[in-house]
Amino acid sequence: MKPFQYKKPDSVYTQSITTAHGQTATQATFHASDIRAEHMAATDPLTYAQAMYEAADDHLNGEEWRENMNNAFPSEVRPYGSQPTAPQVALMEDRSVTFDPRQTYDGRTMTHGEATAGSLVSMEAPEVGILVSGRVSIFDHTVQFGFTERSMEQTGTKLLDDLELTLAGKIAQSLEGQPSVTTAYVGALSGSPAAQAEDLLDILAVHLDTFWGRDISEFGILIPVALRPMLNRAAQRAGLGDIDELVGTRVQVYSGPDRGVFLVPKAFALLSFREDQHGDVWRIELSRNASTQSWDLEVSAVVDVMATAMVDVKLGGSDWETTPVALPIIKQLILSEAPEALPETPEETPAG
């Protein structure tokens, strides 16, 4: 057949796929030959898209994902329409905290108070939840050249890894600036990967607040993804399997802007994922985008970060006058030097 001389299609077949909760998408395909649908599986965009959808749904809405998420960080999956569970932990010894100055009932300004044994540390529900969402477009022309099971596995793994980094990045973003987060500038790392890893481990040990956990294993750690190769190299040199063994606890990497390293006590902080009406944490949709001749695979979930710890503190030694204050339970370690303070501008003296 010469260029631009096309034969009228003499066969057509339709394909339908049912996605989450009964939603159906249908595609019609026209051919100028007697090729049947079952003979085109390795070049059929819908077959590829359906396989990716089913793999994502099985993993993200399965028990394995929930178990892995809880191992990475204390998590709950709460029923549709319910509020996050607010952890409440009793203080078993005296604990003094420093908090923002505030006025008492008689006009006094207090800057220091004491939380006595038996006080409950409660977590405040966040004002804003995090919607984590990602989309990939599966273009017809990229699939019609053919695909294999291995290539699909590589694509699926990359999508899940990117989603994990995005979720962790949003969690780091939500932690930054919270009342229960204290920031420390610890200086930039330098030297070989082994030296940098040793320095980072020393920094973690020095800044570990043993009141919220006796050892590093009782904390979750968030690090920027740029630090992962350096820690992996140090783990290899030490004959260990991964960075979790090197550090002594689960280390979660995140993407996006470098917000430093977060030390989060597992006993006091919590991730609360929301289920939908059908009991799924992740909403997964596969839809046909006719304008780009592609299938769009979209995944999304909503999570609340329970990381603002509050406790009632006595004021001025009084046994009955208390006020709720935020406890500094999370450390944010910035791997750079502290910014220089701006010089104060002298006040101008009025003339005359």
Image (spheres, rainbow, N blue to C red):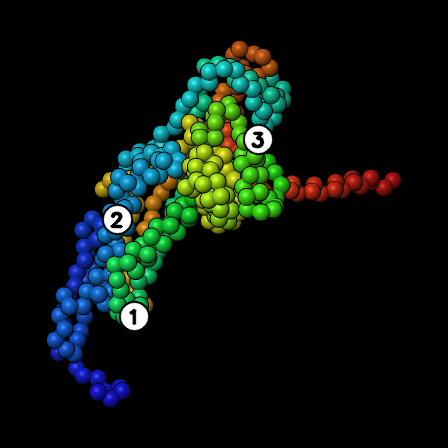
User: What's the residue type where badge 1 is placed?
Assistant: His
Disc marking residue 206: 3
Q: What is the quadrant of the N terminus in the image?
A: bottom left
**Residue at (45% x, 34% y) in the render:** 248
Where disc 1 sits, the SS reads helix
The answer to whether residue 270 is above or below residue 188 is above
User: What's the residue type where badge 3 is placed?
Assistant: Val
Disc marking residue 209: none
Nearer-the-camera pick, 275 or 330? 330
The answer to whether residue 3 is above or below residue 203 is below
Crowd band around label 3 with a 10 angstrom C-alpha radius: few (<14), some (14–19), many (20+): few
Along the polypeptide, which appears first: circle 3 or circle 1?
1
* Mark 3–mark 1 distance (CA, rounded to whole Å): 55 Å
Is label 2 or label 3 in front? Answer: 3
Is label 3 or label 1 in front? Answer: 3
User: What's the residue type where badge 2 is placed?
Assistant: Asp
* Mark 1–mark 2 distance (CA, rounded to whole Å): 25 Å
Picture coordinates of residue 104 (x, y %)?
58, 20
Crowd band around label 1 with a 10 angstrom C-alpha radius: few (<14), some (14–19), many (20+): few
Q: Do the residues under discs 3 and 1 have CB atoms within 8 angstroms?
A: no
For disc 1, the marked residue is: 141
Picture coordinates of residue 289 (x, y %)?
29, 64
Q: What is the quadrant of the C terminus in the image?
A: top right
Q: Is residue 118 visible?
A: yes
**Residue at (28% x, 58% y) in the render:** 150
Along the polypeptide, which appears first: circle 1 or circle 2?
2
Q: Is residue 310 visible?
A: no
**Residue at (26% x, 39% y) in the render:** 63
Does 17 sit left or right of 79 as displayed? left
Disc marking residue 57: 2
Where disc 3 sits, the SS reads helix
Crowd band around label 2 with a 10 angstrom C-alpha radius: few (<14), some (14–19), many (20+): some
